[in-house]
Amino acid sequence: MKRIFFDLYKKNLVQMRKEKPGLYCWPIEELNSIHLKMCEAMINGSFNKDSDAIKATCKELGLKHTYKSIKEYIK
């Protein structure tokens, strides 16, 4: 399940960068490192669930947009 969440999250990072370049203003070349850092933060429980990319990922998976739901899904 973790892999599914993280793959969708990466797709949504790319999409949000296109849709909201003011919020997702990092160079596209940094996508992989940003994705890795965020996945590690999610595993460690030190992330902000309110990013648009995380919200979109939860919506696609039918998850409640809560820390508890995300943590349970990715364990």
Image (spheres, rainbow, N blue to C red):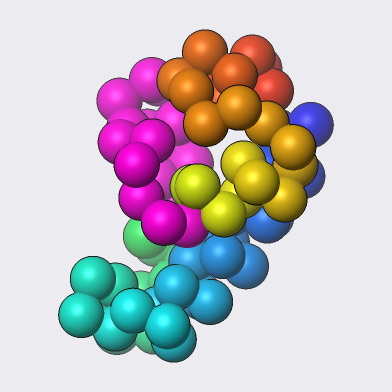
Q: Left or right: 71 with respect to 25?
A: right
Q: Position of residue 15 (x, y in %)?
A: 53, 77
Q: Quadrant of residue 70?
A: top right
Q: Quadrant of residue 73?
A: top right
Height in image: 4 above or below 69? below
Q: Which residues are magenta?
A: 36-53
Q: Quadrant of the C terminus?
A: top right
Image quadrant where residue 12 sits: bottom right
Q: Position of residue 22 (x, y in %)?
A: 20, 80
Looking at the image, residue 15 lies above or below residue 59: below
Residue occupying the point 64% across, 14% down: 72
Q: Is residue 44 above or below residue 5?
A: above
Q: Which residue is drawn at the image coordinates 47% and 57% (left, top)?
A: 53
Q: Residue shown at 50%/47% (left/top)?
A: 55
Note whether residue 69 is visible: yes
Viewer-nearest residue: 1 or 61: 61
- Does residue 69 appear left or right of residue 37 in this picture? right
Please say if 41 is above or below 9: above
Label count reads 0
Residue 3, visible in the rendered structure:
no
In percent of width and height, residue 39 lies at 48, 41
Most foreground residue, 7 or 48: 48
As for residue 22 lying within the magenta part, the answer is no
In the displayed structure image, the side of residue 58 where residue 42 appears, left or right = left
